[in-house]
Image (cartoon, grey):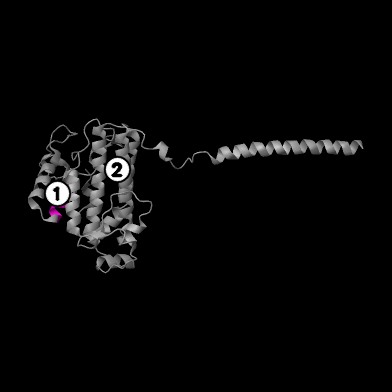
């Protein structure tokens, strides 16, 4: 009887302990399940201040740089600056001979529309931030215009390569429909697209580079981020040039080269130095491809400016 009683007591304690542990783990699991994920940001934790806005701008540029291979291949491999080798795959040969098929991964418009959708989402949230007084109007104007110009450039590229395309300015949950559903997202002609882009881009509140003191102007690994961002006058020149508005294009290009109204990091005021190729008679520019004189055929004499 004592033995049986002992077993019974242990059993009761075990039931109590099991019930306690069940409640404990239920509460603990609930806390674990309700914990915010560490690898993603909830909407309430983004677009809170100027630093979140800067992070959004840099995020757009980070994804923008991922289009480099596609941009080069679609432009230069279809032209005369690149050619395929014996090791090229069939997709590259298709681009080179202007005979691309629908499944060619290099010529898909989806990566461009994916980034356009990112831009649309950023612009929408910038509007919300401004409405909620989360950053100043000058900060808004510069960042909004920057991301908007990236979007205009992306649309210009799509128009150049695909002709009639859908023009979407709202944020979407899925961009697949833009590419596949021509009834919901009706394409517009290239000229109509250019007119739309010129009107939108030229009316942006800020078309100069970021002003001195901007939190986006930094020095990273010894290099300034001043030239990291899109050149808005160059974009407007390109848009007008493609539309055949040559006087307007020349005006924007002149503003670019003369640097009217720009902030000059060097203090010299010679903004055109950022875009010219040096002839060794002046300060070397950023576009130099130079070799030591009389050693032009020696790759080891390359001057890396």
Image-quadrant location for residue 145: top left
- 251 and 171: which one is in front? 171
Q: Circle 1 sits on which residue?
A: 237
Question: Which numbered marker is on residue 277?
Answer: none
Residue 228 in view (yes/no): no
- Magenta span covers which residues? 235-242
Confirm or deny contact between disc 1 and disc 2 (CB under 8 A): no
By secondary structure, the bulk of the magenta-drawn segment is best described as: helix
Q: Could you say whether the residue bearing mark 1 is in a helix, strand or loop? A: helix
User: Nearer the N terminus, badge 1 or badge 2?
Assistant: 2
Residue 279 position in % (x across, y down): 11, 45
Image-quadrant location for residue 157: bottom left
Q: CA distance from mark 1 to mark 2?
A: 23 Å
Q: Residue at x 18, y 56 (%)?
A: 192
Q: Is residue 161 left or right of residue 240?
A: right
Q: Which part of the image, by quadrant, shows the C terminus?
A: top left
In the image as oriented, which residue stretches furthest toward the right? 1
Q: Residue at x 34, y 43 (%)?
A: 59
In the image as oriented, which residue stretches furthest toward the left? 247
Question: Which numbered marker is on residue 123?
Answer: 2
Residue 247 in view (yes/no): yes
């Amino acid at each position: 009887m004592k033995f049986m009683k002992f077993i019974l007591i242990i059993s009761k304690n075990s039931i109590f302990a099991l019930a306690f542990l069940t409640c404990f783990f239920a509460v603990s699991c609930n806390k674990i399940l309700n914990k915010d994920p560490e690898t993603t940001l909830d909407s309430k934790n983004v677009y809170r201040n100027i630093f979140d806005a800067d992070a959004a701008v840099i995020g757009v540029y980070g994804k923008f740089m991922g289009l480099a291979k596609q941009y080069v291949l679609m432009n230069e491999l279809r032209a005369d600056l690149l050619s395929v080798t014996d090791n090229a795959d069939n997709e590259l040969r298709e681009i080179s001979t202007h005979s691309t098929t629908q499944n060619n991964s290099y010529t898909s418009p989806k990566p461009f529309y994916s980034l356009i959708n990112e831009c649309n989402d950023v612009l929408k949230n910038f509007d919300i931030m401004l409405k909620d007084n989360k950053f100043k109007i000058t900060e808004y104007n510069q960042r909004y215009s920057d991301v908007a110009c990236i979007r205009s450039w992306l649309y210009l590229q799509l128009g150049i390569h695909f002709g009639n395309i859908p023009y979407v300015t709202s944020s979407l949950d899925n961009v697949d429909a833009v590419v596949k559903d021509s009834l919901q997202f009706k394409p517009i002609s290239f000229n109509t697209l250019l007119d739309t882009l010129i009107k939108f881009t030229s009316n942006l509140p800020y078309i100069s580079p970021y002003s001195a003191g901007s939190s986006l102007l930094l020095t990273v690994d010894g290099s300034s981020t001043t030239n990291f961002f899109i050149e808005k006058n160059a974009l407007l020149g390109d848009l007008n040039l493609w539309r055949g508005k040559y006087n307007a294009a020349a005006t924007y290009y002149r503003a670019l080269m003369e640097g009217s109204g720009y902030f000059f990091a060097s203090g010299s005021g010679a903004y055109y130095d950022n875009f010219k190729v040096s002839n060794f008679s002046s300060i070397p520019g950023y576009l130099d491809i130079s070799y030591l004189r009389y050693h032009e055929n020696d790759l080891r004499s390359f001057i890396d400016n």
